[in-house]
């Protein structure tokens, strides 16, 4: 057998412990393990090591558990706040959209009426209305662009444990 067959068999043994492998690969692996003592021994040792690791109890210090619980609670509160803000932003967007559509419709009608009264082409009045209607948004966009600052991020939180003896 070639070295690539042994590599493939070992890879399938490793993958098979984590995820399900294809039926054809499983059949090939069984056939290979029945005929190859080295790969069969590797698979058995790997299964024994996996069982031993899974049966080994893992304990955490009270400080680690408390710190983790605190961080989870803080993150949950941040997510609730973010969700509430997104809801308010969505409502604001919808109200702004309705106001914009209503004011555009009213402005268009007003521009037609004004064009008739002052005997100017309706397109000229409409262009002036659109410019007047968009001017505040353009001015605010320019103001934000000129005075924008980079986002500030909170300082990186370091792990509170200073030595590995606290983990045991």
Image (tube, rainbow, N blue to C red):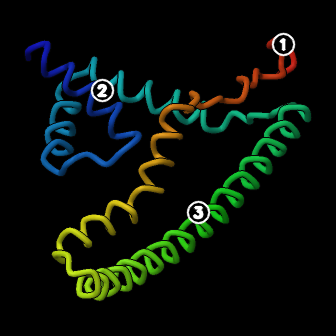
In the shown orientation, is residue 58 left or right of residue 50?
right
The nearer-to-camera label among 3 and 1 is 3
Q: Is residue 18 visible?
A: yes
Secondary structure under tag 2 reads: helix
Residue 78, horizontal then vertical, whole percent: 72, 51
Residue 42, horizontal then vertical, whole percent: 36, 22
Q: Are marks 1 and 2 in contact (CB under 8 Å)?
A: no
According to the image, label 3 marks what residue?
86
Q: CA distance from mark 2 to mark 3?
A: 56 Å
Q: Is residue 168 visible?
A: no
According to the image, label 2 marks what residue?
40
Answer with mark 1 or mark 2, whichever residue precedes in sequence. 2
Quick one: which residue is furthest to the right in this view? 62
Answer with mark 3 or mark 1, whichever residue precedes in sequence. 3
Q: CA distance from mark 3 to mark 1?
A: 38 Å
Q: Are marks 3 and 1 in contact (CB under 8 Å)?
A: no
Q: Say which mark, if any, is on residue 162.
A: 1
| Residue at x 90% of width, y 32% of height | 63
Secondary structure under tag 3 reads: helix
Q: Residues within 10 Å of mark 2 (few under 14, many from 20)?
A: some
Q: Say which mark, if any, is on residue 25.
A: none
Residue situated in front as seen by the camera: 83 or 120: 120
In the shown orientation, is residue 68 left or right of residue 83?
right
The nearer-to-camera label among 2 and 3 is 3
């Amino acid at each position: 057998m070639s070295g690539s067959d042994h590599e493939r068999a070992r890879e399938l043994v490793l993958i098979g412990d984590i995820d399900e492998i294809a039926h054809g690969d499983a059949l090939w692996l069984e056939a290979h393990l029945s005929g190859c003592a080295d790969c069969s021994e590797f698979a058995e040792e790997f299964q024994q090591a996996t069982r031993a690791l899974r049966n080994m109890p893992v304990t955490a210090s009270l400080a680690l558990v408390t710190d983790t619980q605190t961080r989870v609670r803080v993150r949950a509160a941040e997510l609730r706040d973010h969700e509430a803000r997104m809801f308010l932003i969505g409502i604001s967007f919808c109200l702004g959209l309705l106001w914009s559509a209503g004011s555009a419709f009213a402005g268009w009608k007003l521009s037609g009426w004004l064009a008739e009264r002052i005997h100017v082409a309706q397109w000229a009045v409409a262009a002036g209305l659109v410019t007047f209607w968009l001017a505040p948004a353009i001015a605010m966009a320019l103001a934000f662009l000129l005075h924008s600052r980079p986002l500030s991020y909170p300082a990186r939180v370091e792990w509170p444990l200073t030595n590995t003896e606290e983990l045991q």
